[in-house]
Amino acid sequence: MIGINKPGMATAAGFGTYELFQLMRDGKPRTRADLAAITGLARSTVALRIDSLTELGLVTPVAYASSTGGRPSARIAFNPTARIVAAADFGATHATIAITDLAASTLAEIRTPLDIGTGPEEVLSCLCETITKLLEQIGRDAIDLVAVGIGLPGPVEHRTGRPSKPPLMRGWDGFDVPGRVQQAFPVPVLVDNDVNIMALGERSTAWPDTDHMIFVKVATGIGSGIISGGQLQRGADGTAGDIGHISVSRGAGIACSCGNMGCLEAVASGPAIAAALRASGEQIETISDLIAQAGEGNLSVIQAVRQAGRDIGEVLNACVSIVNP
Ligand SMILES: [Zn+2]
């Protein structure tokens, strides 16, 4: 992505420049001798790889190692501020757009209401304008941008970055999201389902040693990200983990936005709970109303939320048998 060898191009020793960079992303300063010891590479090979990474600005010399009597050895560490990344999380009704450094520290961020149903042209134009605004805000140039990452609230064919029959996103099916963004920013644009990205983020920040997990998001839709054997499972068309459209016993006769009947999402998502409560006379318009009234102790709201939890549990019970997280 940043001009360094990808894993498939690693050397016979298994430690190409890419692997060395991944190793150094933990931020610990190390000497060339440390790196040779960890990787099993010859010191001359380590030096060559470090030179390439230094040229790209991705690693940089830092303070000296304590001397053991001989000449002090220069230590090298990951340089997270060298380049920047733009990240966008689109929900059904809102967006969060941010610029981060290479260690994922947020440098600037905007949260804004945005209806994903207005279609890809409008939403992605807004994204590109916002990235430009944020770059100005932090005084960085678009040339420093190394990639754009986008999470969408529906299934995405990760290989092409095209949404795959997303039920909540009218007009997005098959749209070339990377192509549109690259008109403004000619860098790699990685697109995935928002829950998959959340699962990867949750694992890398909170559960780095966990190889089997299911991450569940309940909002306007319901979805999950499945990590099995240490790998995110996307499935053939990017719809693996789309648990919102598994039918549940309480859903009989209830229509879902996907066109089927009885889906989990049709009974246990935020809007579904709110609609059922409205039908029984409660004054609830939005998910925020729902959360507020549950917090205030409104009994019928609490019961409805608990029931949604049981519905989600019914589906997760099956998921646990299949995936064994
Ligand atoms: Zn459905």
Image (cartoon, grey):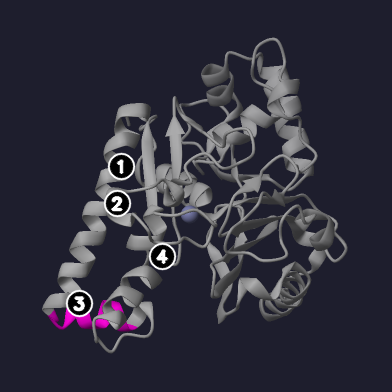
**Mark linked to residue 219:** 4
228 lies left or right of 44: left
Q: Which residue is mark 2?
A: 312
* Viewer can see residue 72: no
Q: Amino acid at mark 1?
A: Leu
* Viewer can see residue 283: yes
Q: Amino acid at mark 3?
A: Ala
Quarter of the image that includes the C terminus:
top left
Q: Which residue is mark 3?
A: 294
Q: Which residue lies most toward the front here?
A: 253
CA neighbours of label 4 inside 10 A, class few (<14), some (14 to 19), many (20+): some
Q: Which residue is mark 1?
A: 316
Residue 87 image offset from top left, x and y in percent: 62, 61
Distance in Å between CA atoms under marks 1 and 2: 6 Å
Region rendered in magenta: 289-298
Observer-nearest residue: 166 or 42?
166
